[in-house]
Each structure stands twice: as C-alpha cells, then as structure tokens.
Image (cartoon, rainbow, N blue to C red):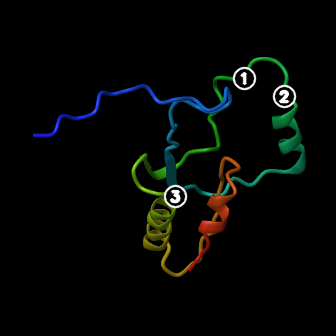
Amino acid sequence: MVKPEPRRPPVRIAKQQPTNKKKMATVAAVFTKAPFIRTPQQVVDSIFRSGPKDATKQSPFKPENKRVWASLTKGKSVVMDEVRQEVLRRDPDGLKTLVALTDGERALPIRYHRA
C-alpha cells in the first residue's frame, strides 16, 4: 500500500501570479425584433433626454422568441456554433438582418460568421 503525499499549498513564484484560475462563462442570446424606424431627431432626443423617463411611453424594444443560454464547461466555439444553428433554424433563407453584439473579446467575432 502506498501512502499519498501530504498536501502542500502551492508555492507562489511571484506576487503577480494568481492563486487560482478563473473561468469565464460564455453567454449567448438570440431573439427576434421588429424594426423600429425613427427620424434623426428622435434618435438625438433619445440620446440627450434630460429629466425622468416618461412611464406612459412603452419601450420600442420588445424582443420576441428570446432564447438565452450560458456555459462554463463548453468552449466559445461550441456556444457560437449553437448560436449559428439557432439563427439558421429561425431564418434558413437568410432574409433577416443580423446584429451581433459582443463584450469586446476578440475571439468571439472571429468565431461567428454566417455559414
């Protein structure tokens, strides 16, 4: 019978070395939205609006058929493939305008492109 070695805390080589590895989740959402056409003045007014927001006005942004999912275990490529499959399922003929928003990670726009 072999006894396991006693557990020792890991030795830090430098102050800047992290003690643990953090995992980043990949989160995706796909939804459909009817176009909201505005005049240039309406856009400017919405950007530079001052004072409280009027509670009686409804927001023009109403997502429909929204699907959101996240994963810590699947890689970015797998999640982006799921997004691509969902988009192709919803719009097989490619007639809808697609908009992709990312948090700035360079790998995401590279991995997502229309097949």
As drawn, is 55 to the left or to the right of 92? right
Question: Exactly how many numbered labels are in the figure?
Answer: 3
Residue type beneath disc 1: Lys
Q: Residue 11, can we see it? A: yes
Question: Could you tell me if the residues under marks 3 and 2 are in contact, i.e. CB atoms within 8 Å?
Answer: no
Residue located at (63% from left, 37% from top): 59
* Viewer-proximal residue among 113 and 10: 10
Q: At 64% across and 60% down in the image, what residue appears? A: 107
Measure the alpha-carbon separation of dots 1 and 2. 8 Å
Q: CA distance from mark 3 to mark 2?
A: 38 Å
Residue 98, position as x, y percentages in the image: 63, 65
Q: Can you identify the residue that label 2 sits on?
A: 49
Instruction: Name the front one of labels 3 and 2.
Output: 3
Q: Label 1 to label 3, Cα distance in Å?
A: 38 Å
Residue 40 image offset from top left, x and y in percent: 89, 49
**Residue 45 located left or right of residue 61:** right
Q: Amino acid at mark 3?
A: Lys
Q: Which residue is mark 1?
A: 53
Residue at which label 3 appears: 76
* Res 37 → quadrant: bottom right
Quarter occupied by the C terminus = bottom right
Q: Residues within 10 Å of mark 2 (few under 14, many from 20)?
A: few
Q: Is residue 85 above or below residue 51?
A: below
Q: Residue at x 90, y 44 (%)?
A: 41
